Amino acid sequence: MIDRRNPRIPTVDVDSQFLDRWSPRAFDPTPLTDDQLAALFEAARWAPSCYNDQPWLFLYAVTPEDRARFAKALVPANQVWAPHAPLLLFVLCRRRFRHNNQENRHARFDAGAAWMALALQARKLGLHAHAMAGFSRQKAYEILAVPPEDYDIMAAVAVGRRGDAQMLPEDVAAREQPSDRKPLSEVARQGQF
Amino acid sequence: MIDRRNPRIPTVDVDSQFLDRWSPRAFDPTPLTDDQLAALFEAARWAPSCYNDQPWLFLYAVTPEDRARFAKALVPANQVWAPHAPLLLFVLCRRRFRHNNQENRHARFDAGAAWMALALQARKLGLHAHAMAGFSRQKAYEILAVPPEDYDIMAAVAVGRRGDAQMLPEDVAAREQPSDRKPLSEVARQGQF
């Protein structure tokens, strides 16, 4: 499971899945099986949420036609690589709670938790998931026929097996490795801000 | 690892960690070790984020004094059980990107991903993490000395080993089991909204 090219060094002993999850751009176009596809959403389904509202919604494309249509919402830099992935999806969250129709200020936070579950389940299946903020929200709303007053489109995601980085343009291939993080000391503080 | 009292039934085969993560209210007050504490934040540290901005920040309390102080921000229903947990923390996210000081509309989403990593790492350590929206934001800003213009306080979290549900008030104890979810068919849709 561990990618020996992964340069990440943990500060303390931690489950390897967190180091092993990263966001490649070279994807192998081999289609996912129906069970793989369902398992990704199943992992997300069990995420925690405020009032158990489960505000997340995943809109996905697996056919060549749907993937090409979804890809039109991506910025050019992502159109270079993301359409090769066998699964493209958008992560949405519902703006208001179902039980009282009040604004849900936790919707994005909860959708982020569901996205993380999906990304970790992808690794359990030998896949990678790469989330993108680089897309036109206006185009995504149009292409996906999403009512903007009800749902917020938070991220686009490409999922698949890793492909050969040589398929990428040179400048993109040069970035094809796990990114580093701020030191642990900057992530948590004791007692107060 | 699997809790036999867990009534959750997956729709498809999925990694058991997602079913095994839930939010109990009965916590054992035994302190966490320093390595356990660090591992929770280490897992969160490696979460993905827009521009790798890592907008999350965890403010935590482990001493009796700090835990009592943090607990004052919780709503009464959470004050009943959460202060027994050996670790209380708040999840914050930075409102603006570090690289250009522009609004980061993905900050909550990314903080949610980091929170999910922490929650899953908790289970790997034999612990549970229970996130709460039930707290006074105003009190939390004051108690934690957080600048509201820079950081959004998204959630309070109690972490520890499970305790005996008999320590809980009867009405709280009655809810002490994993919650269910919407069907998988409502989580993901193919092609468009």
Image: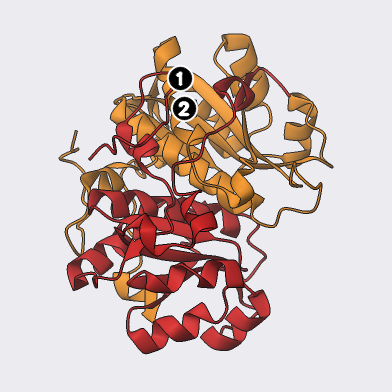
Chain colours: A red, B orange
Tell me the residue that label 2 is attached to. Answer: B42
Residue at 45% of width from left, 68% of height from top?
A: A82
Tell me the residue that label 1 is attached to. Answer: A11
In the image, residue A98 sits, relative to residue B15, either above or below, namely: below
Q: For this rendering, which residue is in front, A96 or A109? A: A109
Secondary structure of the residue carrying numbered label 2:
helix
In the rendered view of the protein, which quadrant contains the C terminus of chain A?
top right
Secondary structure of the residue carrying numbered label 1:
loop
Residue A102 image position (x, y, % from top left): 66, 67
Chain for disc number 1: A
Chain for disc number 2: B
Circle number at residue A91: none
In the rendered view of the protein, which quadrant contains the N terminus of chain A?
top left
Q: For this rendering, which residue is in front, B22 or A135? A: A135
Q: Residues within 10 Å of mark 1 (few under 14, many from 20)?
A: few
Q: Amino acid at mark 1?
A: Thr
Q: In the picture, residue B190 is in which quadrant?
A: bottom left
Residue B156 image position (x, y, % from top left): 58, 36
Tag 1 and tag 2, C-beta contact below 8 Å:
yes
The answer to whether residue A124 is left or right of residue A115 is: left
Residue A108 image position (x, y, % from top left): 59, 58
Residue at 38% of width from left, 35% of height from top?
A: A19
In the image, residue B193 sits, relative to residue A114, either above or below, namely: below
Can residue B79 be spotted in the picture? yes
Residue at 74% of width from left, 46% of height from top?
A: B97
